Image: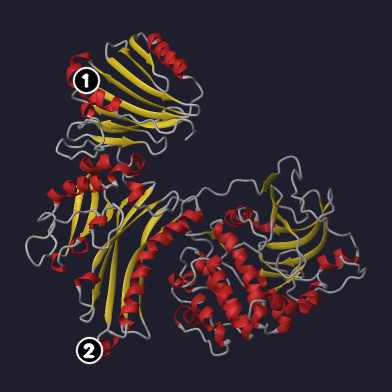
Amino acid sequence: MSDTWRVPGYTEVDVLGTGGFGRVVLAKHEASGQLTAIKYLQPDLLADARIVDGFRREAWLLSGVRSPHVVRLFDFVETPHGAALVMEAVPGVSLRALLATENVLAPESALAILKGSLLGLAGAHAAGVVHRDYKPGNVLVSREGESKLVDFGLATLAGHSGLTAGSPSYMAPEQWSGQPGRPATDVYAATCVFYESITGHRPFEADTTQELRSMHERAPVPLDTVPEALRPLIARGMAKDPAWRPSTADAFVTELETVARKAYGRNWEKRGWKRLATSVAALTALTPLALLTGAGTAAAPVAAGAVAAGVPATGTGTGVTAVIIGKIAAAIVVVGALVTGGILIFGNKSDPPPPAPLTVAVKTLAGQEQALPLKYDLQYPEVAGGADPAARQRINAALRAPIDKRLKTIRDAVANPDWSPRFTETAETAVARSTARVLLQTPTLLSVRYDHDLDSSVLSHTTWRFPETVNVDLVTGQVLGPKDMFRPEVLTATGMRTLTQLLEPHTRNGFCRTPAVTGVGRKVTIDAADRTSGGEHVPGAAIGFTAAGAEFEILWYDLGCDTASGKETVTLPYAEIGNLLLPRFLASLGQTGSSTPSSAPSTAPPSTPSSSVPASGETTYTNQRFGFSAHVPAGYVATPYTPEKGDGMTFTNADLDATLTVWGANTGGQRTSETLAGVVARAEAAGGKVTYRKDEGDHYSVSGYLSDGKIFYERGYPGSKSKAVLRWVYPREHKAELDAPVSASLDTFRPGDVSQPH
């Protein structure tokens, strides 16, 4: 790599700063006249693959961030002779330079700067990027009254480790121990900088690095010099445990604005920037970019620690700024096709590094309340990796929610005036424990069970100890409820009776009866609507999923039994519950289908005509996407069927060599007669024989023999935008025993809305 290599198409104007990894220059793009900041990697570092990879990674990460509060990357250029980042040039000064001049900022001004840089962090966090080096030198304060985040040299993807280096004065406890980056790590550093801005000194100062580490990890935050109204904000942002900080910068902004409005009024932000205006303008006027875009003609020295062009400067200008080049074009020009011949150009449209696979680890939240007689040791799972940072954030929020709720509930109980005197009298400290266990993890689903326990003679009732489950879609981050698991016809009074009958043989003593003063109380069911409090027709139990089946965590006292009945875990094998679950949910569990035993009660609607009432054990298959439904006989195994532009299910009975296939597809537009003619033509072209056909206006029916001699029968509902089709295929020798099931499925086939695509 040559010391004289420059990005082609640019003329260097001034040196903005130098550092261990390279230097930053102000440069003019020759074709457009736009001023940019170019960060060059040091020539002698090109041979170090780790450093070059880190330089590329900075470009990858920065290119994925879209925020007006983050300096923009235009291009990454790498050749055999050098590597460089071409970035936005922004007139402004670093917060470090501002603090060197002002020492202490007014609270409103510090809050305004913090808010803007937090919004920059929020943009990074939304893209899955953790900055990991938030410090005053990396916060740019512009003369337009905004703050921007710069220098992503130590950034990493959330949940991943990067370089362990950072700025010790602002490093969070978990960063000292080399843990993977997380948004809460950036929140800690930003709070440290905010503390410094309003007090004039850093929160922790020591003579050695080891002492500094110890203070960040264990020492309480010194809040005596902090305005009282801001102490809760700083205490929360600098909590030792990242779980007690705001989970993202965006969440911290919300808390900041609430505190600022309460303490300083509605116009706090406007006043804060107004107070900064004079100092920022004076310092910015001395930067190379300001000199080049202003009316002056003489060069002036750059203030120590100033920033021009969105990158930290550690040196001064070279004097070339005495030549005035002209004003920057109003529109931002994204530089493209800069050079030719052997040069790799990476811009905002390039692909980021491939995401790491999603992994799950069990974390522990442990501690002791200072003001309450309460200790806690609570487990919860946390995921890392994955392709979608936003989904990962939703997943982790869902997995952490039961623990946060549990801790709040017990805190409130211990502090309750009815119970707190008893804790004082007995000198008891309650101990809350929760264990978390991953029941099942597939590529698209995570099922977790929490067991909550409490050691306390004051809060001794059995209802303080119970299991809880959470099921999360790993693609979207959505928490799944009964409507995401069960077929619609199951979430009815009839369907819940069916589920109760399936569960009862697996319980220890059957479903109990409600307590009664005289006589015998009613028998409880799994239906939540049957409880005293009422509700929807959904299972009145937490449900988790394992490789073997569905685990129902039944709290008998919650269903209406006496409290001595306790609780029970009941596992229902997929062979029994499978046909009650939605096909797509069943697939997410890693199950392809199930057969329903002949003893299982029917969920068929009572309005089915008597000539078509399915035999005991039959169920209804409903396709949620296309909205059609059909009855399926007992003993048929389901497997997904995916035609072009559609989906459906095939049900097979191996003993009878019979298949029932039901599907929908977005291939509408033909009249019924045209669709029927097409079915006939395809059957005959394949060597089959059609013996019956009928156009019935909104649907058609056709049957005959396939080339192998099997009988086929098809009924279809073609519409203007989509269609729904049911098709049977079975051997002639089983015709007599299949006539009734075939007729029942045909008579109860409901096509859904075929006038719309799905």
What distance separates the C-alpha of mark 2 from that of mark 1?
75 Å
Q: In the displayed structure, would residue 95 be above or below residue 26?
A: below
Q: Quadrant of residue 408?
A: bottom left
N-term-proximal mark, 2 vs 1? 2
Total number of numbered labels? Answer: 2
Q: Is residue 275 left or right of residue 298?
A: left
What residue is rendered at 84% in x and 74% in y? Answer: 301
Find residue 435 and report its horizontal and vertical position in percent: 28, 65
Q: In the displayed structure, would residue 518 be above or below residue 59?
A: below
Give the crowd class for mark 1: few <14, some 14-19, many >=20 residues within 10 Å: few
What residue is rendered at 38% in x and 46% in y? Answer: 443
Find residue 396 and report its horizontal and vertical position in percent: 42, 60
What residue is rendered at 62% in x and 71% in y? Answer: 115
- Kindly identify which residue carries mark 2: 426
Taking depth in this image into account, of 679 and 748 the one nearest to the observer is 748
* Amino acid found under the numbered disc labelled 2: Thr
Q: In the displayed structure, would residue 315 be above or below residue 55?
A: below
CB atoms of marks 2 and 1 within 8 Å: no
Can residue 80 be seen in the rendering of this structure?
A: yes
Q: In the displayed structure, would residue 597 be above or below residue 722?
A: below
- Kindly identify which residue carries mark 1: 739
Residue located farthest toward the right when viewing the structure as drawn? 297
Q: Is residue 240 left or right of residue 10?
A: left
* Element on which disc 1 rests: helix
